[in-house]
Image (spheres, rainbow, N blue to C red):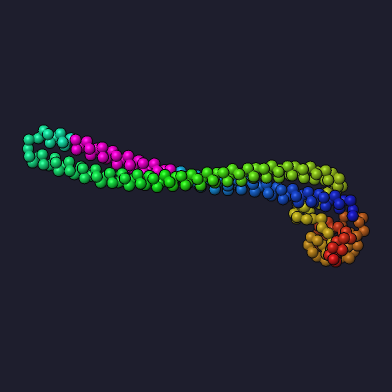
Amino acid sequence: MLEAIENLLILQDRDLRIERLEEELEQIPAKRAALKDKTSSSQAALDAAKRRVMEIESRRKELELEVKGLKERIEKYSNQQLQTKKNEEYKALANEIENCKRQITGIEDREIECMEQTETAQKAVKAAQAVADEARREMDGLVGELDSRETKLRGELASFEASRQEIAGQVEDSARNRYQRLFDSKGGKVVVGIQHGVCGGCHMRLPTQIVVQVRGNQELITCPNCARILYYTRDMDMVVAE
Ligand SMILES: [Zn+2]
């Protein structure tokens, strides 16, 4: 095989690996963001559960204040009762006191309901907390994995880039430029083998003359149909024949 072809094949291998590494690296920020989204939704659920507890608690405090107000009114009416000499007025005040006491009983029932609701809401907070903690732990772990994967990929990328640089320096300019133009425009494999007289890139049958030239290993030959650089090794036909 032509040395230029051997080098171009290594160059192509490095370029394809670099491309794959870059693609994978590009996806990492989105993956990281998706993981963070997942924890933020469980955190939002936890916040909502905590808000619910506070809402019930503040309703219960309002009820407490209402009871306090009613008790003050009862006290005021009782004092007025002590001062009045009129039977009618005394009775009216007694009615008012009764009325306040009934209201207090009603409010106290609602306070008990509130306390029960608080208990349920606190259980919900506990459950949401567990879910959020688990999501956070899971995220920390996965983000850690992602971070080390990224570090590993960057290391591989750097080493492939260095190796690519070295190989590129060994390829003659015109061959390298031709390869580079093809790689940039077509992507994927641009140095392709011939198997049974067919181009490994576009799969078109090659003229015999071209196959003979490629077999001659004298110069870089390109496919007349797709312009990819062709190479030929004896084991290619053997592999297919097996
Ligand atoms: Zn072709």
What x and y, as percent, mark residue 90?
10, 39
Residue drawn at x 28%, y 38% is 65
Q: Quadrant of residue 51 in the image?
A: top left
Q: Nearer the viewer, residue 82 or 8?
A: 82
Residue drawn at x 19%, y 38% is 74
In the image as oriented, which residue stretches furthest toward the left?
Answer: 86
Bounds of the magenta span? 50-75
* Whether residue 206 can be seen here: no
70 within the magenta span: yes
Q: Is residue 86 above or below residue 177?
A: above
Residue drawn at x 64%, y 45% is 146
Q: Is residue 95 above or below residue 82?
A: below
Q: How many numbered discs?
A: 0
Q: Nearer the viewer, residue 57 or 211?
A: 57
4 within the magenta span: no
What x and y, as percent, mark residue 136?
55, 44
- Magenta: main secondary structure: helix
Q: Is residue 151 above or below residue 201?
A: above
